[in-house]
Image (cartoon, rainbow, N blue to C red):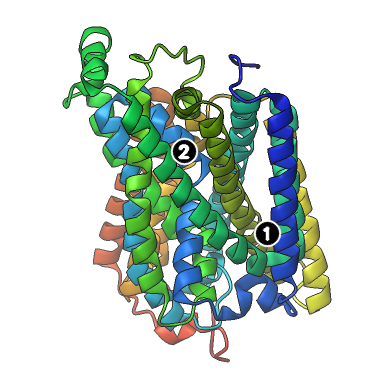
Amino acid sequence: MEHQSAVLSANYGWILLALLGVIWVALGVYWGRKAKSMEGFMLAGRNVGLALGAATAMATWVTSNTTMLAPQFAYELGIWGMIAYSTAAFGLLLFAPLAKRIRQLMPHGFTSGDFIRLRYGRTAWYVFLAISIFYGFTWLISMGMAGGILLNALAGIPYQVGMSVILLVCVIYTLFGGLYAVIGTDFIQSLIILIGIVIVGVGVLSFVDFEQSYTHLISERPMLINVLLPAAVMAIFNNLLFGIGEIFHSNVWWSRAFAMRQDVGKKAYMLAGFFWLPVPIAAGFIALTSGALGINVTSPDMVGPLVAASVLGKIGAIVVFIVAFSSLASSIDSLLAATSDLITEDIYRKILNPKASEQTLRRASAYIIIGLGVLAWLICLPRIGTLGTVLFFAGPMVGSTIWPIATGLFWKKASTTGALWGMLSGSILGLIAYFELGWYTASLIGAATSMVVVVIATAFSKSRFDWVKLDEAHPETTGGSTS
């Protein structure tokens, strides 16, 4: 689907795309030279410091979904919608103490799947892997779509071509560099994102007439400034829990917790959360001016880039292009690396080939990265739905993992029964809500259902988990706890 006239010419778009692609591939290959072992490839040697740790967390969370969905939230749900997306910062902030706890309890851990397997046993582990891999792939699809949409909107590059190039670039440098390449490029990408957002924000603020925008909202779309708009209020809690669930369960964030030095994780995630908090508010605010500026928005998930490019002209479009590409790359590379680690370590090594050598694992990881990229490309080709509908379909599933993970890290009484049925019941009821009530209720219902099940099961549990079992280097490590 092609959209309205692009601000940049296709020639500018192709030049920027080629230049950025070459830079990220070159940097990824350069930093990837440090990955001499499988642990280096997957976890960057477990020696990431505060600056790189905070930058990679912040850059990864400033996805294309942030720069596109935050404006979409504001455009469709108004002021509360804009604020709703910013609540995802609490995922980073609340994960900070968990990161410290994870590093203490699992100094030799590799993935979030390791925790579920050792803490709750194999059945819960299988369910968790299904949820986590499905979510990761859904996120990857949404970002591939976002790349194609953005390049088409900004430079007229055909959706399928732009999407293909962005996925290819990220697959190449992740393939060669692993987490070393991901964290190194994330550091530069985070600086570009912050500087770019400041430039766009200052430009929009200097151009927009607030009184005119407010008058237009009052007369044309008064529901957007209605503080009691039910869907918007519900979206706040739904997005809050979705963001927490995304981070709590995803190997994207666990791999960073394992990669950071033991005294770094908590500080890095706190800094990343505070830096990220104003980004969706700034990105969402400009969507409220689209009506007063007379911009014809043909698709809600395009409103942010179109407003910024229309207000700031060609220079603004170039800045938006660079910021968008950086935010896409910082998330796609992280997702490719973390998901391939989860499949390589938890499925290939733990289930299919326990005696695999390090060389075999590295080869398997490469095939998995390529496979994820190709499969995402095939699904993205026809462009299914909007970014919101695609991404939030996984919301109830990730919401159902919050309580099993949080209680499992801190409560000895947290049981396998509670974790297993919390994830299953939360996912099922949340998905029913997604189709019957709306996407903005799904994560809330999924998380609430899981909470009730986990808390009740814990109250009746007689198990007392031994934390030593989480350190798989110990010979006495066994399966999960018992109810």
- Residue at image location 46% in from the left, 71% down from the top: 51
How many other residues sit within 10 Å of disc 2, few (<14), some (14-19) or many (≥20)? Answer: many
Q: Amino acid at mark 1?
A: Ser
- Say which of 49 and 460 sits in front: 49
Q: Which-is-in-front pick, marks 1 and 2?
A: 2
Mark 1 element type: helix
For residue 374, what is the image quadrant? top right
Image spot of residue 399 (x, y percent): 39, 48
- Residue 420 visible? The answer is no
In the displayed structure image, the side of residue 325 where residue 37 appears, left or right: right
- Residue at image location 82% in from the left, 66% down from the top: 363
Q: Is residue 67 above or below residue 99?
A: above
| Between discs 1 and 2, the one toward the N terminus | 2
Mark 2 = which residue? 67
- Say which of 467 and 146 sits in front: 146
Image spot of residue 458 (x, y percent): 29, 65
Image spot of residue 165 (x, y percent): 74, 39
Image spot of residue 105 (x, y percent): 43, 81
For residue 77, what is the image quadrant? top left
Mark 1 = which residue? 340
For residue 345, what is the image quadrant? bottom right
In the displayed structure image, the side of residue 112 where residue 329 appears, left or right: right
